[in-house]
Amino acid sequence: MKHVLFAGLILLLAGCGTTATDVQEFNISTADVPAYSLGSEYRIGVEDVLAINVWRNPDLAVTVPVRPDGKISMPLIGDVQAGGLTPAQVTEDIGKRLSRYIRDPQVAVIVTQLRSHEYLSRVRVTGAVRNPVSLPFRQGMTVLDAVLAAGGVNDFAAPARTRLYRKGTDRTRVLQIDLDGILTEGALETNVVLKPGDIITVPERLF
């Protein structure tokens, strides 16, 4: 039985955060918000870094970047196509080719660095903040972390009306964030743990 591990997309909950299901939300058309998502069927790209292990065969373990031609090199079997394929497909191909030399090879392919899809995995903070920013996603990052990285809100902000846009497989979720409560009262109920591709928008107040 072959195992496919895709560690690059595991999200951890931060102690001061909360899950998105705890936050009031409403839906809009996915065409209305330029959100991004890695998706469940991640396709490996050039410059992604793969860690490949074969059970009970440590000499075959490699950690390699995907070359510009979309291939990686493995002991015994040489070049293997990885670019444009899912980790599951690469695992299956490596297993079949290794079976010529090893009995029932058990292969694990782990995407350790998502270099080719860097912008798909970023978090963006826009609107009435001091420095609108596009941040590399980090596990455990919360709304507060992202807003502080953007320099906080500016003098024209209406932080209580902050929204978080999250692209799903068939719709975009809009989460209502009480950023004013987070910043001034330490109310962390809506301090959502972020996901790759999230967009935080802080509106200006109405005069």
Image (tube, rainbow, N blue to C red):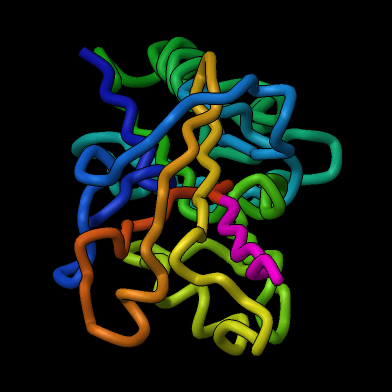
In the image, residue 112 above or below residue 167: below
In terms of depth relative to the viewer, which is nearer, 137 or 131? 131
123 relative position to 15: left or right: right
The quadrant holding residue 14 is bottom left
Which quarter of the figure is the C terminus placed in?
Answer: bottom right
The quadrant holding residue 145 is bottom left
127 relative position to 165: left or right: right
Q: Which residue is at the far front?
A: 207
Q: Which residue is at the far right?
A: 69
- Is residue 177 rendered magenta in the image? no
- Is residue 204 rendered magenta in the image? yes
Q: Position of residue 196 (x, y in %)?
A: 51, 49
In terms of depth relative to the viewer, which is nearer, 21 or 160? 160
The quadrant holding residue 113 is bottom right
Would residue 32 be visible to someone looking at this image?
Answer: yes
Which quarter of the figure is the N terminus placed in?
Answer: top left
- The mark tally for this picture is 0
Q: Position of residue 83 (x, y in %)?
A: 71, 30
In terms of depth relative to the viewer, which is nearer, 153 or 21? 153
At x 64% / y 69%, what residue is drawn?
205
99 relative position to 129: left or right: left
Q: Which residue is at the far left?
A: 15
At x 61% / y 59%, what residue is drawn?
201
In the image, residue 100 above or below residue 174: above
Q: Position of residue 23 (x, y in %)?
A: 28, 45
122 relative position to 190: left or right: right
At x 68% / y 25%, what residue is drawn?
81
Q: Position of residue 72 (x, y in %)?
A: 66, 39
Would residue 134 be visible to someone looking at this image?
Answer: no
Q: In the rendered structure, which segment of residues is drawn in magenta?
A: 199-207
